[in-house]
């Protein structure tokens, strides 16, 4: 870190994040004027109103410019729905947010516009929740979080920055190359041309006119905003005393007047152009795509001309990291926030892997990106390294050196399994090789897919219900079909069959929920900014949520706690059906009593085979369950006409999910966390080290999943020498060669974490990884902290 | 020596992903029983060739269930907790089975060579890619020679690289028979001076050094030297000099020397074995001292590695 980056980084440390209301007010101002116009035009006009009037500033020392919120380190209050209710707001204030009473009043004044008119996602969805079928299911929490009111869903209120909340909960990797190489002006001109040539012969052609008009309006506004920054930089330069800074500001002025309207000509311009686009689509889940690939031509050209040094490139990469750190996101009610573990973010930059030709894609920039993360030590954006058979060992070591710092990144994903998954879904091989990641780990194609991997389905809740003949002990309702009393099952297979029947039932309800969600988003959140950066956007002439994409993974079903159920099933099979050490009645009584007075049964349950130790007895059950989930998922269709996809990420749902799940026969008490990840072991249950855990994970057929998640925690002593790291690299490659999709490491020792819980003030920059993203440990909820601590630590 | 799949042995741990016990990713089989009694032993549970109880005092509620269960009358209640008479205990493990809070664990598992081999072979995929394999450690593998040979042979036949970690204290006959199935030997040098060696480990090192020469020159098995660094016992510059001198002049200059700093992880184990009287309190060596010792080894032209 040089002096500049150090200073920029220092300014990231704030005690409270101020909430800024400017965007909400500007958007509302526009919305009130455009009532009745096509939704996408309204969005475009609101975009322009916001971008033209927003407060802008350039901070000292910045090389890449562009503020999002109106205040440094601010979060923009959500502009597409009502504010948090009083209680929630108070809690947020106790936490890390600051909102002045005056601003709160301004926000409150707008709540009326949003509520009771079907204008929010939740209200729209609630319309379809009939009392008989869907509403009891939605309330049950099988799909996390449980709703309390039909019109409040996951809770009102959100704050983040950028204009990227526009597509609701959908994840997209946009095609950055379009802007970097062609520039927005050219794309806008194309849209204008298309509009001139458009003839109104069909309903679609009329909608297309709206779309094109919206694209033109919104994207011209983006270029205007860049020019405003250019003007500001020039003005600041004229007043600047330091000659150095004056020069920098002049360069900033020149750059902002050039990009993103025009094609970037240098690495510096490409970085600035990237940032402008990022600002426009920024959300908690905005992905960086294959950053080392699409930025490389600019870097290479500069290097060839000797117009940039690696130190300068590194500085710019670090400035970008700082930029991304300057915004945050928080949304929803308490359960929802717990699910996302505080200020969660999934801004994933993907590096390495193979080129469309199948060659190794690693380049100098890939190394520099790792170096920037290691040097600057910010938790965002996160980095994922694509690994293939011929990934250079040096690169693996470099990546693991970063991991060793305890920063919780990079994650590693296996090209083999990802590419095979895409090809199996009829993606042409060359395109499949160019895959990227959305959110934590979902397989995506830049500009060619969108996914919605947010539904967290609590499998252990269904286990409880299956044990009770379809009756849900938590809500006291008959939620599922009557599949038989546990006491009457003659064989384990009969019970398993009943469980699967329940599972399929609730999965089908989830599929419906997902479709309702997708349709509500499609109607409410057209987005001319994202949409332009999709493949064939202008020719297609449709909003990104209103078209079928080349790789259609728009809806996914995502199980949480499957491993707990595998362990539970193994215990039931062994203790109840095979060895008959525990009667069915005893087991049910013990679970209902949360094992109080049944310590002996819990001990037997704990001693039963556990996933994560390479024990086929339970691994085969896990395999069977995951296969069943994938097969069943493929029987449902999304509103885009494509089969739903199976995904396996739990994010942080295992905490709040566990909180509403009763005791399970794997030895878990009621309320305790569920297993994290999807092919990780339940916390502390894998006691034979990393190879045994991987053997279990390899027993699961991961091929039909667009992501799986495996967490491993390493004590630093396992990563001391280059030789240690080399062995770890081999471990990773072996796993990926055998069908593994993902692995990530937590490198930190337990005592440090315990101490950090006691003295958070001493550990403000302690970073840990929580399922797909990194966060400051002291900012996490207690339950997530406990969870991290309890994961098996491999003392070597 | 007659080796067989069914030869029984006593082990106390199979550790997967061992990365500091030889090349590549390995599985280390810890065998029970050791002819030496190093005062600083960090694995006291490995010393006896017999099953033993590991007892976690702080978990014990004093319920007395184990007292009833013990057929040898080895357990009594004392100050609200159970206490084991280690002389009477024959290692049945009954108490561990019945203790409701898992305060008792049995150390030591009797297994056949075939069974151990099967456990080892599970990670074959990882050995292949990393150039790893199996490491027999302990305790002292040479203390159960028939079992060791049986396991090693099964592994070698399956193409798994074999390593034996030994203190070298056994008859040449035994050494020769076991190590002829080893691809690599990790050889421990605890002290170079025979009298000091006897004082700290209970036996003199003449046989050990003699075996080292023969293994290296006659059997010609690749060897790594392992020197534990135990402050105040063997950490003097003189001892390390003399040890390195021996290795470089009597063995060979191509032997890599691993200097293993003492760690305290073994401390709690004495408590668990209710052998607190045997525990010694040693401060781990400082980083600077380790570096200084490393330099000494290097000055002889040998490669020196800190840690595994
Ligand atoms: S292991 Fe057996 S003999 Fe020893 S104390 Fe326990 S029950 Fe008694
Ligand atoms: S059974 Fe366990 S808890 Fe009870 S006295 Fe024995 S060791 Fe203590």
Image (spheres, rainbow, N blue to C red):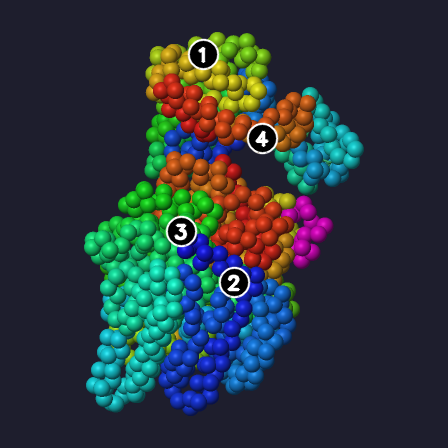
The chain under label 2 reads A
- As for residue B60 lying within the magenta part, the answer is no
Residue at the spot 59% in from the left edge and 78% down from the top edge:
A102
Q: Is residue A90 visible?
A: yes
Q: Are tags 3 and 4 found on a single chain?
A: no
Q: Are tags 4 and 1 found on a single chain?
A: yes
For this orientation, the residue located farthest to the front is A241
Circle 3 or circle 4, nearest the eye: 3
Question: Residue B131 appears at what percent x and percent y?
Answer: 35, 33
Q: Which residue is mark 3?
A: A2
- Quarter of the rendered structure image containing ligand 1: top right
Q: Which image quarter: residue A480?
A: bottom right
Q: Report the magenta residues as a range.
A: A589-602
Q: Which residue is mark 2?
A: A343
Residue at the spot 40% in from the left edge and 18% down from the top edge:
B179
Q: Are tags 1 and 2 found on a single chain?
A: no
Q: Are tags 2 and 4 found on a single chain?
A: no
Above or below A197: residue A148: above
Q: Nearer the viewer, residue A257 or A109?
A: A257
Q: Is residue A449 visible?
A: no
Residue at the spot 28% in from the left edge and 45% down from the top edge:
A390
Question: Residue A784 appears at what percent x and percent y?
Answer: 56, 55
Q: Which residue is mark 4?
A: B264
Q: Which residue is mark 1?
A: B209
Q: Nearer the viewer, residue A210 or A316?
A: A316
C-alpha gap between disc 4 and disc 1: 28 Å
Circle 3 or circle 1, nearest the eye: 3
């Amino acid at each position: 870190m040089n002096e500049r980056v150090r200073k920029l980084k220092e300014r990231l440390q704030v005690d409270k994040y101020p909430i800024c209301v400017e965007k909400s007010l500007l958007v509302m101002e526009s919305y009130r004027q455009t009532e009745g116009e096509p939704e996408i035009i309204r969005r475009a006009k609101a975009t322009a109103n916001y971008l033209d009037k927003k407060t802008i500033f350039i901070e000292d020392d910045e090389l890449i410019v562009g503020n999002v919120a109106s205040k440094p380190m601010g979060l923009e209050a959500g502009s597409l729905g009502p504010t948090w209710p009083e209680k929630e707001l108070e809690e947020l204030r106790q936490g890390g947010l600051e909102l002045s009473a005056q601003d709160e009043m301004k926000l409150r004044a707008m709540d009326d516009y949003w509520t009771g008119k079907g204008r929010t996602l939740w209200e729209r969805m609630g319309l379809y929740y009939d009392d008989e079928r869907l509403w009891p299911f939605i309330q049950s929490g099988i799909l996390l979080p449980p709703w309390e009111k039909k019109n409040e869903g996951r809770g009102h209120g959100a704050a983040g920055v950028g204009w990227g909340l526009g597509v609701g909960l959908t994840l997209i990797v946009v095609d950055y190359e379009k802007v970097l190489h062609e520039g927005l002006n050219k794309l806008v001109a194309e849209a204008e041309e298309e509009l001139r040539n458009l003839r109104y012969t069909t309903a679609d052609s009329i909608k297309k006119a709206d779309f094109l008009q919206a694209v033109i309006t919104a994207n011209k506004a983006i270029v205007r905003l860049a020019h405003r920054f250019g003007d500001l930089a020039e003005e600041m330069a004229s007043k600047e005393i330091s000659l150095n800074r004056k020069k920098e500001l002049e360069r900033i002025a020149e750059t902002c007047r050039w990009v993103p309207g025009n094609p970037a000509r240098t690495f510096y311009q490409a970085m600035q152009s990237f940032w402008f686009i990022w600002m426009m689509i920024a959300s908690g889940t905005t992905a960086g795509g294959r950053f080392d690939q699409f930025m490389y031509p600019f870097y290479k050209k500069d290097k060839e001309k000797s117009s940039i040094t690696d130190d300068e490139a590194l500085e710019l990469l670090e400035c970008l990291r700082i930029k991304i750190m300057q915004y945050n996101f928080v949304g929803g009610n308490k359960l929802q926030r717990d699910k996302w573990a505080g200020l969660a973010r999934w801004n994933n930059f993907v590096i390495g892997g193979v080129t469309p030709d199948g060659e190794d894609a690693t380049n100098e920039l890939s190394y520099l990106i790792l170096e920037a993360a290691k040097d600057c030590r910010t938790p965002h954006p996160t980095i994922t390294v694509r690994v293939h058979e011929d990934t250079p060992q040096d690169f693996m070591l470099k990546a693991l050196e970063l991991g060793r710092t305890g920063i919780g990144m990079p994650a590693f994903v296996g090209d083999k399994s990802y590419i095979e998954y895409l090809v199996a879904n009829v993606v042409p091989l060359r395109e499949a090789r160019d895959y990227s990641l959305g959110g934590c780990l979902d397989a995506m194609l830049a500009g060619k897919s969108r996914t919605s991997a947010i539904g967290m389905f609590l499998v252990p809740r269904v286990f409880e219900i299956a044990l009770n003949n379809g009756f849900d002990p938590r809500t006291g309702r008959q939620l599922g079909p009557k599949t038989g009393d546990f006491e009457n099952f003659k064989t384990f297979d009969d019970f398993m069959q009943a469980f699967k029947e329940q599972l399929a039932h609730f999965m089908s309800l989830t599929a419906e929920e997902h479709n309702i969600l997708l349709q509500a988003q499609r109607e409410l959140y057209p987005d001319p900014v994202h949409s332009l950066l999709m493949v064939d956007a202008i020719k297609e002439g449709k909003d990104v949520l209103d078209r079928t994409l080349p790789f259609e993974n728009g809806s996914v079903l995502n199980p949480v706690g499957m491993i707990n159920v595998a362990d539970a099933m193994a215990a039931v099979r062994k203790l109840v059906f095979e060895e008959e050490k525990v009667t069915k009645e005893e087991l049910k009584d013990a679970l209902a009593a949360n094992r109080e007075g049944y310590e002996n049964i819990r001990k037997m349950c704990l001693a039963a085979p556990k996933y994560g130790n390479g024990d086929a007895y339970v691994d085969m059950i896990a395999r069977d369950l995951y296969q069943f989930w994938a097969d069943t998922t493929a029987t449902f269709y999304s509103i885009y006409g494509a089969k739903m996809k199976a995904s396996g990420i739990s994010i942080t749902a295992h905490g709040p999910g566990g909180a509403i799940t009763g005791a399970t026969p794997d030895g878990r008490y009621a309320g305790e966390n569920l297993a994290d990840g999807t092919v990780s072991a339940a916390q502390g249950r894998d006691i034979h080290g990393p190879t045994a855990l991987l053997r279990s994970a390899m027993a699961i057929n991961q091929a039909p999943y667009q992501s799986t998640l495996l967490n491993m925690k390493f004590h630093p002593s396992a990563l001391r020498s280059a030789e240690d790291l080399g062995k770890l690299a081999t471990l990773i490659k072996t796993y990926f060669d055998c069908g593994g999709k993902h692995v990530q490491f937590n490198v930190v020792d337990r005592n440090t974490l315990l101490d950090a819980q006691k003295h958070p003030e001493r550990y403000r920059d302690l970073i840990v990884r929580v399922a797909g993203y990194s966060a400051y440990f002291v900012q996490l909820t207690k339950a997530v902290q406990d969870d991290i601590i309890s994961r098996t630590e491999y003392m070597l | 020596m007659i080796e067989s799949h069914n030869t029984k042995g006593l082990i106390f741990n199979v550790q997967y992903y061992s990365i500091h016990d030889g090349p590549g990713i390995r599985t280390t089989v810890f065998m029970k029983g050791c002819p030496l009694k190093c005062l600083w032993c960090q694995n006291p549970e490995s010393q006896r060739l017999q099953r033993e109880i590991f007892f976690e005092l702080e978990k014990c509620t004093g319920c007395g269930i184990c007292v009833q269960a013990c057929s040898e009358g080895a357990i009594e209640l004392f100050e609200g907790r159970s206490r084991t008479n280690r002389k009477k205990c024959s290692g049945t493990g009954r108490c561990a089975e019945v203790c409701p809070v898992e305060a008792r664990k049995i150390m030591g598992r009797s297994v056949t060579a075939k069974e151990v081999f099967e456990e080892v072979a599970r990670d074959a995929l990882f050995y292949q890619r990393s150039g790893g394999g199996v490491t027999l450690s302990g305790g002292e593998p040479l203390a159960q020679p028939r079992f060791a040979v049986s396991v090693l042979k099964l592994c070698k036949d399956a193409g798994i690289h074999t390593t034996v970690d030994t203190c070298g204290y056994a008859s040449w006959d035994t050494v020769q028979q076991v190590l002829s199935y080893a691809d690599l030997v990790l050889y421990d040098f605890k002290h170079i001076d025979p009298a000091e060696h006897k004082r700290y480990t209970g036996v003199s090192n003449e046989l050990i050094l003699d075996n080292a020469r023969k293994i290296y020159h006659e059997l010609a098995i690749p060897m790594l030297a392992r020197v534990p660094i135990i402050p105040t016992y063997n950490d003097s510059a003189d001892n390390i000099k003399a040890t390195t001198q021996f290795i470089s002049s009597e063995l060979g200059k191509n032997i890599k020397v691993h200097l293993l700093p003492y760690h305290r992880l073994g401390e709690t184990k004495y408590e668990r074995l209710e052998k607190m009287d045997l525990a010694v309190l040693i401060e781990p060596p400082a980083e600077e001292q380790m570096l200084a010792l490393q330099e000494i080894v290097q000055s002889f032209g040998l490669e020196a590695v800190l840690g595994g």
